[in-house]
Image (spheres, rainbow, N blue to C red):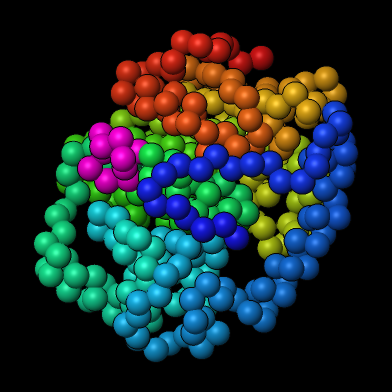
């Protein structure tokens, strides 16, 4: 596990020697069977035995305790439920325990939600933490990931200074359907009513959750009448479904990873279920020369064509794998340009296949 570097931006490197792997049949498609089977049994073990050991006491929840422990902000087992600026309360999807994290991801309290909210109120008064105002940026990570994966992006936008708050959400989306994750997201965003404008960036599965929130869910629940929604950028989104999800949704992995069933849908089914964002949105696809699937460019996980979504104002292809794209300075600069101007930087702009 790599540590968060504050301040600064670190571009993640592709791990392992994957040179000469020219066809995803050796990696993302057929070749990942062993990985997903192993992952399925690991999740069984984690779910039944150890839960999330990121902070001490997770095996023995129920006590209200004040703490001062550094965390990594929440892996895929933690779900944010409440934000006050960049202070936030999370819930463990294993034990149901809550914890309060400060902006540096230090755990200040754990136990019941009521206790964490009470401690947060004490800090609010002591530190004079203001309510939300100005522009707010919301980031949402992808499958088998956590907020730590988008922390470089969050740091970059905080240093950029255009947003009064950058909320890097932790979501246990791997163990919930897209609709369930959307409902959790809606509960968090309902607390941002003091903001003047809210922009969004989602990576992979996170971009589908945000698509649902800004599409079908917004249409049915009047989101745009209640909140000042701005623009939205999707990074490496499986808008037409993911072939890897279709292959691996059956079996042990699919039992625990509920999101795979949503990602296995085809483009028409996803449009029926999640709709299309009602705000201005754009798509960034990744591509890497070492990964080709039946002659089509990919980011080592998704083909370029699966990122397309009718209604997108802009579409752009950048060099990088699925995990490198959300940690690239070039990506950050293009996101900023679209959120501010409604267009990407001109170089390499194009249309989806």
Report the residue at 61% width, 50% height from top: 143
Report the residue at 29% width, 80% height from top: 115
Left or right: residue 170 versus residue 16 is left
Figure quadrant of the C terminus: top right
Q: Is residue 343 above or below residue 324?
A: above
The residue lying toward the viewer, choosing from 89 and 225, is 89
The residue lying toward the viewer, choosing from 161 and 294, is 161
Residue 294 appears at what percent x and percent y? 85, 24
Left or right: residue 252 versus residue 261 is right
Q: Is residue 207 above or below residue 172?
A: above
Report the residue at 40% width, 66% height from top: 90
Left or right: residue 42 versus residue 333 is right
Q: Is residue 213 above or below residue 116?
A: above
Residue 48 appears at what percent x and percent y? 67, 79
Figure quadrant of the N terminus: bottom right
Residue 247 appears at what percent x and percent y? 81, 45
Q: Is residue 224 magenta?
A: no
Magenta highlight range:
157-166
Left or right: residue 273 versus residue 68 is right
Residue 30 appears at what percent x and percent y? 87, 42
Report the residue at 35% width, 55% height from top: 187
Q: How many numbered marks, from 0 up?
A: 0
Quarter of the figure with residue 106: bottom left
Res 220 seen here:
no
């Amino acid at each position: 596990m790599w540590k968060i570097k504050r301040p600064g931006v670190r571009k993640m490197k592709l791990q392992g020697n994957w040179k000469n792997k020219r066809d995803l049949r050796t990696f993302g498609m057929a070749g990942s069977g062993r990985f997903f089977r192993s992952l399925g049994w690991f999740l069984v073990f984690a779910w039944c035995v150890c839960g999330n050991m990121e902070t001490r006491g997770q095996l023995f929840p129920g006590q209200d305790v004040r703490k001062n422990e550094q965390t990594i902000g929440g892996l895929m087992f933690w779900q944010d439920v409440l934000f006050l600026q960049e202070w936030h309360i999370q819930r463990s999807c294993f034990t149901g325990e809550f914890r309060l994290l400060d902006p540096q991801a230090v755990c200040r309290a754990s136990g019941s939600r009521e206790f964490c909210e009470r401690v947060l109120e004490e800090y609010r008064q002591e530190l004079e933490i203001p309510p939300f105002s100005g522009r707010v940026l919301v980031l949402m990570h992808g499958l088998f990931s956590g907020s730590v994966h988008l922390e470089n992006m969050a740091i970059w936008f905080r240093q950029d200074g255009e947003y009064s708050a950058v909320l890097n959400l932790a979501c246990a989306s791997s163990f919930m359907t897209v609709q369930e994750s959307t409902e959790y997201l809606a509960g968090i965003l309902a607390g941002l009513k003091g903001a003047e404008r809210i922009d969004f960036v989602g990576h992979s599965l996170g971009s589908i959750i945000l698509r649902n929130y800004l599409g079908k869910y917004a249409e049915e629940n009047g989101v745009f009448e209640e909140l000042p929604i701005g623009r939205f950028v999707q990074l490496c989104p499986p808008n037409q479904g993911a072939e890897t999800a279709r292959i691996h949704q059956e079996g042990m992995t699919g039992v625990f990873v509920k999101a795979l069933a949503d990602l296995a849908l085809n483009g028409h089914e996803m449009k029926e279920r999640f709709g299309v964002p009602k705000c201005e949105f754009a798509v960034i696809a990744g591509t890497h020369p070492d990964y080709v699937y039946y002659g089509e460019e990919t980011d080592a996980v998704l083909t370029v064509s699966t990122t397309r979504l009718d209604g997108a104002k802009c579409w752009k292809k950048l060099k990088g794998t699925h995990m490198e794209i959300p940690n690239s300075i070039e990506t950050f600069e293009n996101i900023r340009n679209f959120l501010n101007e409604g267009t990407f930087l001109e170089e390499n702009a194009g249309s989806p296949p």
